Amino acid sequence: MFVIGGIYTLKDFSKDDFDVIIQAGQSNSEGCGLGDAEAPFERSGRVWYLTGDFNEFVICAANEDRWGNDIVGNFSLSFAREYMNAGLLADGRKILIIRAAVGGTGFSDGRWGMKDDLFLRMTDMIRTALGLNPRNRATALLWHQGETDACNYLPGETYGQALTALVAAVRDACGDGDLPFVAGDFVQEWKAENAAICEPIIAASRRVCAGVGKAAFVETDGLKSNTQDTGKDCNIHFCREAQYVLGRRYFEAFAKI
């Protein structure tokens, strides 16, 4: 039994058939996009989140989050919308997005390695989602991460080895050695200001996507930061509209795998 839309109503999700999308990484995957969006996600009964802390997971209707008076977007919402619009969600099935990303985290600070807390939490979430119903199936691993490791001067080779191991372990947890994996570039404004530390991580991400099979790397040219769109001092994060475009680009890459 899981919470649905608050603490007062419970629903048995073992009767629902889910296509499971894993969204992991750090803040740009968690979603920090501010500003307006041309076509915001509208809550429906077909797209759900699996979220929660290390002690309790919660299933709730997918929707944008709020920071005080600000609405913040994340790219899984437009990815899910494109997934449905393309006819990939069969009649009677729903989408369950595993929200495993946590801001400001990486391999270099002991969060995403094979024995680290966020990796173990993510694999627990995967087992929970797939264990709800034998008809549930994992369909994609969406990853956006690396800013923390760039700032910590993690060597590109080390990053690539860690990310390759993570992809393999997630595929193993899902029971699918061909589970599509999609990663993406940083915010271009922030990347340009920090090119020396960013390039080794991005180059490693590209190599991983080229080497693990059934994977794609998404470019982020033309996507604005929060600073560029809203004037707020936050140029490491994609703005809200950019998050929606990023989700469409992730889906386009996924669809070609």
Image (cartoon, rainbow, N blue to C red):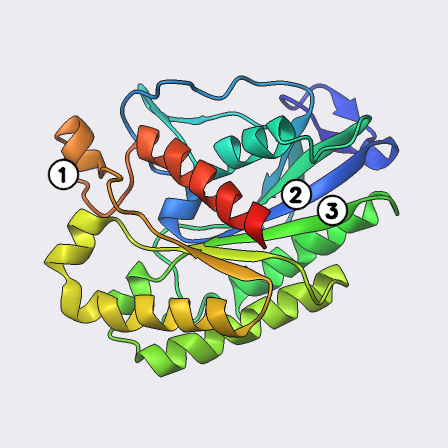
Say whether marks 3 and 2 touch (CB < 8 Å).
no
At mark 1, the secondary structure is loop
Mark 3 or 2: in front is 3
Residue shown at the point (67%, 65%) measured from the top left: 171
Question: Where is 61 relative to 26, above or below?
Answer: above
Which label number is shown at residue 48? none
Mark 1: few, some, or many residues within 10 Å (few <14, many ≥20)? few
Q: Tell me the residue that label 2 is attached to.
A: 57
Q: Quadrant of the C terminus?
A: bottom right
Vertical order, 8 against 192 (above or below): above
Q: How many angstroms separate mark 3 from mark 1 (CA)?
A: 37 Å
- Residue 207 appears in the picture as rendered: yes
Left or right of residue 124, residue 22 in this image: left
At mark 2, the secondary structure is strand
- Asked whether 4 or 194 is in front, the reply is 194
For the view shown, which residue lies furthest in the front direction?
Answer: 256
For label 3, the residue is 129
The residue sitting at 66% across, 59% down in the picture is 179
**For the N terminus, which image quadrant?**
top right
Residue type of the residue flagged with mark 1:
Asp
Quarter of the image holding residue 205? bottom left
10 Å crowding of disc 3: few (<14), some (14-19), many (20+) = many
80 relative to 122, above or below: above
Identify the residue position indicated by label 1 in the image. Answer: 233
User: In the rendered image, is residue 115 in sight?
Assistant: no
Give the x, y percent position of residue 79.
Answer: 52, 36
- The mark nearer the N terminus, 1 or 2, is 2
Q: Distance between the residues labelled 3 and 2?
A: 10 Å
> Contact, CB < 8 Å: mark 3 with mark 1?
no
Compare marks 3 and 2 and give the one earlier in the sequence: 2
| Mark 3, secondary structure of its residue | helix
Q: What residue type is labelled 3?
A: Ala
